[in-house]
Amino acid sequence: MSYKNMFEGLFGIEKENIRINQDARISKKAHDNIFRENNPYIIRDFSESQIEMITSPHKSVLEAYNELHNINHIVISTLKDAIVLDPFNGSGTTGVAAKILDRRYIGIDNNKDYLDLSIRRINAERKEAKGMI
């Protein structure tokens, strides 16, 4: 089997999230009702603290990623009191999305340049949002 076979077939992505409460402890609060239904894409894992997002099989990784992006958007927009935690903040794209959806955001990164960039991007989003009001 060659490495080329690795790029043949179908691709799916599974993403697990840990919910935390206001005190930054793992949440034990029951999930919102939307996540209690039999949903093949957004499910609870073995504990109340986790939400698991699963894509369908796709012909490319990009298609699977795009579906995961859409599923993630549904989860974030559904959880009105959520704090979005991104332990790999990078340039802050998740933080900008959190601000657009009016969510609180905590971004963590070990690169100060990326943190500075993300702060500028999030502040620019705030200014743009204020201009729309």
Image (cartoon, rainbow, N blue to C red):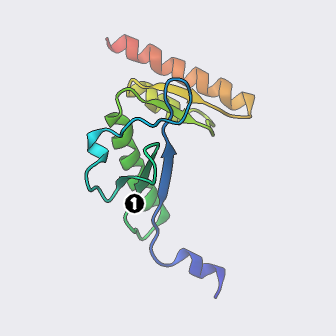
Closest to the observer, 107 or 4:
107
Residue in the picture at 40% in, 45% down? 72
Return the residue found at the far bottom: 1
- Under circle 1, the secondary element is loop
Q: Position of residue 21 (x, y in %)?
A: 49, 29
Name the kind of residue labelled 1 in the image. Answer: Thr
Q: Position of residue 110 (x, y in %)?
A: 74, 34
Residue 78 occupies which quadrant of the picture? top left
Q: Is residue 28 above or below residue 13?
A: above
Residue 103 occupies which quadrant of the picture? top left
Closest to the observer, 40 or 107:
40
Q: Position of residue 96 (x, y in %)?
A: 48, 29
Residue in the picture at 44% in, 32% down? 97
Q: Is residue 132 above or below residue 80?
A: above
The image quadrant where one finds the C terminus is: top left
Residue in the picture at 74% in, 33% down? 111
Q: Is residue 120 left or right of residue 22?
A: right
- The residue carrying mark 1 is 55
